[in-house]
Image: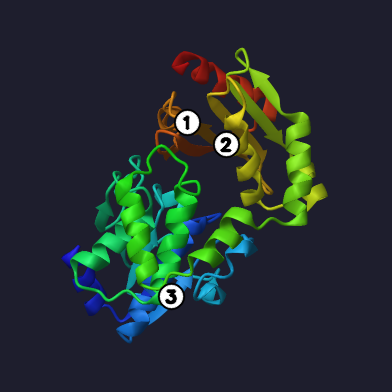
């Protein structure tokens, strides 16, 4: 951890990277670090390849600073919550620090801080700050809380324990606007997301004696509803509340080509293992991967279900 701070002190221009299709954990981590670097009067930029970023997360400090062009003058880059180098969306020529909590992280950085026992990357970053005597202000606390809230499924996931709530208490003590985070992340929903949810539930399949819920979303579904990728997440996770369902599978055609696959589990099945078989990664209960070969949604579904059957 001290090595990371030393690298930061030596750098002239630092670029913070949120992964493709970023969630609150990746954005929250970068937001908190952005504030820290500004306090140290560092030149800092924030990069994300995705042009469509969930606007319900626009309340995060410095969100408006995110750019889709990687600055050539950077001499240090820091990636947050990205298990695989491909999800950075850019080839990094400068020195790279990799900060993440995914057990499937490939340690692609020149310096890696990967701790899978942390519930979120923001939690790991908070630990880094605390152990090095960094003062946490309101903006940093809000950004860290946002990532913690999102990755813990609003504190409902199996990984939540007393340590999680102790951290929440500390963050609120540092001024975290937890009410705003709760409203925007746990409650806020767009009209497009509601339209997509209707489409997803209408076409949902229950496989393996209703132990697996399956959603197949076409490009036309996304275009018709006006939804973005993140809008698929809520119905996927909600389906795990159905009686008997142990695994939820989402297959979504991407705008250009390929299929994005997301897996969720109620902790009965290691979906991270399934994702790894397809070159992806994640956690025991949350994982994902991409299929680049030319296959239909139905063909992809059959392949993945075969592996899920074995795990069940």
Please tell me which residue lies in front, 155 or 125. Answer: 155
10 Å crowding of disc 2: few (<14), some (14-19), many (20+):
many
Give the label, 1 or 3, closer to the camera. Answer: 3
Pointer 3: residues within 10 angstroms few (<14), some, or many (20+)? many
Vertical order, 105 against 44 (above or below): above
What residue is shown with label 2?
261
Indicate which label's residue lies in the foreground, 1 or 2: 2
Count of numbered marks: 3
Residue beneath disc 3: 139
Which of discs 3 and 2 lies nearer the camera? The answer is 3
Residue drawn at the location 37% of the way across and 40% of the way down: 159
Horizontal and vertical percent position of residue 24: 50, 58
Which dot marks residue 278? 1
Residue situated in front as seen by the camera: 200 or 279: 200
Report if residue 288 is visible in the image: yes
What element does badge 3 sit on?
A: helix
- Which residue is drawn at the image coordinates 66% and 49% (left, top)? 231
Q: In which quadrant of the rendered view does residue 95 lie? A: bottom left
Q: Is residue 278 left or right of residue 299?
A: left
In percent of width and height, residue 209 lies at 62, 12
SS of the residue under disc 1 = loop
Query: What residue is drawn where x is 66% and y is 21%?
Result: 206
- The CA span between labels 1 and 3 is 38 Å
Q: Are marks 1 and 2 in contact (CB under 8 Å)?
A: yes
Q: Is residue 53 left or right of residue 151?
A: right
Task: Give the percent coordinates (x, y) of residue 242.
Answer: 62, 27
Task: Where is residue 22? Give x, y as percent.
Answer: 52, 56
Dot 3 or dot 2, earlier in sequence: 3
Quarter the N terminus occupies: bottom left
């Amino acid at each position: 951890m001290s090595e990371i701070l030393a690298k930061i002190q030596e750098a002239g221009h630092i670029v913070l990277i949120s992964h493709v299709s970023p969630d609150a954990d990746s954005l929250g981590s970068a937001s908190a670090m952005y504030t820290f670097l500004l306090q140290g009067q560092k030149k800092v930029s924030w990069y994300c390849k995705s042009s469509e970023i969930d606007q319900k997360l626009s309340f995060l400090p410095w969100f408006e600073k995110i750019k889709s062009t990687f600055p050539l003058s950077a001499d240090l880059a820091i990636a947050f919550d990205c298990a695989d180098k491909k999800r950075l969306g850019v080839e990094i020529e400068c020195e790279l620090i990799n900060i993440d909590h995914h057990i499937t992280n490939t340690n692609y950085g020149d310096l890696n801080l990967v701790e899978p026992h942390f519930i979120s990357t923001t939690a790991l970053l908070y630990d880094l700050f605390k152990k090095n005597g960094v003062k946490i202000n309101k903006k940093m606390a809000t950004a860290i809380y946002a990532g913690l809230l999102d990755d813990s499924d609003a504190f409902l996931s199996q990984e939540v324990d007393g340590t999680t709530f102790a951290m929440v208490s500390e963050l609120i003590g540092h001024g975290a606007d937890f009410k705003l985070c709760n409203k925007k992340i746990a409650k806020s929903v767009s009209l497009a997301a509601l339209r997509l949810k209707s489409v997803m539930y209408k076409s949902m399949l229950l496989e393996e004696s209703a132990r697996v819920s399956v959603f197949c979303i076409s490009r036309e579904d996304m275009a018709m509803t006006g939804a973005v990728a993140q809008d698929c997440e809520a119905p996927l996770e909600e389906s795990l509340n159905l009686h008997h369902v142990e695994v939820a599978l989402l297959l979504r055609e991407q705008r250009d080509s390929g299929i994005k696959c997301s897996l969720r589990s109620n902790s009965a099945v290691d979906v991270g293992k399934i994702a790894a078989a397809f070159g992806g990664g994640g956690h025991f209960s949350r994982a994902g991967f991409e299929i680049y070969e030319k296959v239909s949604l139905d063909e992809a579904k059959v392949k993945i279900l075969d592996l899920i059957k074995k795990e069940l």
